[in-house]
């Protein structure tokens, strides 16, 4: 799982939250009410290990105590999430996919709920807003940006998992090879979207068919 570094700019009413991974990629940038519960809820959406939390605040002792409370609650949240996923056979299967961690596994399972709702696995990507818009006019058929419809949290989790697979994972699979080829001929951003969409298809098929992740094209 990627290491995460969090910066908190705290005031009495609101806190600006910024989280980056070890590659310097911004994973979260938002504002939250200045209490530990709200800040933890915002950070809980991220899939990774919180390596360091930095605090920028005035000389307010209460705010310094909030930092310790946030660390404690995040650690407890991560431990509970890991316990739940380890006791869930489907989530354990999802997590055999390089880049897919507890947050992504649980988010996908909760959002899809029942795999039989989708006749084709390819429909899941469109349901989560990962399918590109199509513009048709006469003989012209152009594809634009993804629709971003559906559950934003699950879409973001799949996008993060794709990023980890392509840039951090040392395990080569047919899916990673396919994504790297897209990145070379186009861009890493487009490759992440394409791999995120393919992850949705693969995870749905694993769930529906009760199969394991296939590591190679031959498999």
Image (cartoon, rainbow, N blue to C red):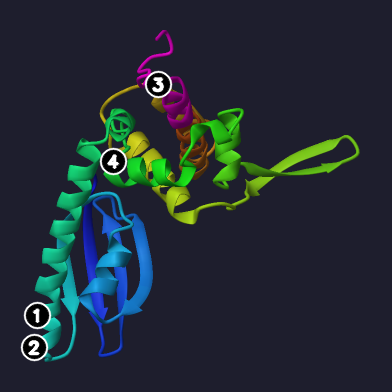
Q: In the picture, which quadrant includes the C terminus?
A: top left
Residue 61 numbered tag: 2
Secondary element type, mark 3: loop
Relative image position of residue 192 (x, y in whole percent): 46, 40
Q: Mark 3 points at which residue?
A: 210
Tell me the distance, in whole angstroms, between the alpha carbons under discs 4 and 2. 36 Å
Tell me the distance, in whole angstroms, between the alpha carbons under discs 1 and 3. 47 Å
Is 76 rendered above or below residue 54?
A: above
Tell me the distance, in whole angstroms, between the alpha carbons under discs 4 and 1. 30 Å
Residue 65 numbered tag: 1
125 left or right, relative to 79: right
Q: Residue furthest right?
A: 138
Q: In the picture, which quadrant includes the N terminus?
A: top left
Residue 153 numbered tag: none
Q: Residue at x 36, y 62 (%)?
A: 28
Secondary element type, mark 1: helix
Tell me the distance, in whole angstroms, between the alpha carbons under discs 2 and 3. 53 Å
Task: Classify residue 176 by image quadrant.
Answer: top left
Task: Classify residue 27 by image quadrant.
Answer: bottom left
Secondary element type, mark 4: loop
Tell me the distance, in whole angstroms, between the alpha carbons under discs 1 and 2. 6 Å
Q: Residue at x 28, y 59 (%)?
A: 44
Task: Let me know if residue 208 is in the magenta part.
Answer: yes
Q: What stretch is highlighted in magenta?
A: 202-219
Relative image position of residue 98 (x, y in whole percent): 31, 31
Relative image position of residue 24 (x, y in whole percent): 29, 55
Label located before the other in sequence (4 or 3): 4
Task: Let me know if residue 75 is in the magenta part.
Answer: no
Report if residue 51 is visible in the image.
no
Q: Mark 4 points at which residue?
A: 101
Marks 1 and 2 close (CB-CB < 8 Å) = yes
Q: Which residue is drawn at 61% across and 29% down?
A: 119
């Amino acid at each position: 799982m990627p290491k995460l570094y969090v910066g908190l700019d705290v005031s009495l009413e609101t806190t600006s939250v910024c989280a980056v991974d070890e590659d310097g990629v911004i994973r979260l940038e938002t504002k939250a009410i200045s209490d530990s519960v709200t800040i933890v809820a915002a950070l809980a959406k991220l899939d990774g290990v919180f390596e360091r939390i930095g605090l920028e605040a005035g000389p307010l002792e209460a705010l310094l105590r909030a930092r310790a409370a946030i660390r404690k609650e995040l650690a407890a949240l991560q431990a509970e999430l890991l316990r739940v996923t380890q006791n869930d056979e489907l989530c354990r299967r999802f997590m055999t996919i390089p880049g897919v961690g507890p947050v992504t596994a649980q988010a996908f399972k909760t959002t899809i709920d029942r795999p039989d709702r989708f006749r084709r696995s390819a429909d899941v990507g469109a349901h989560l807003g990962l399918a590109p818009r199509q513009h048709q006019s006469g003989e012209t058929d152009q594809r634009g940006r993804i629709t971003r419809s559906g559950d934003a949290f699950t879409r973001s989790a799949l996008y993060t998992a794709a990023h980890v697979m392509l840039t951090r994972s040392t395990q080569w699979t047919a899916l990673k090879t396919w994504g790297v080829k897209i990145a070379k001929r186009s861009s890493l951003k487009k490759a992440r979207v394409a791999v995120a969409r393919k992850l949705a298809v693969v995870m749905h098929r694993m769930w529906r068919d009760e199969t394991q992740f296939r590591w190679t094209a031959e498999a």
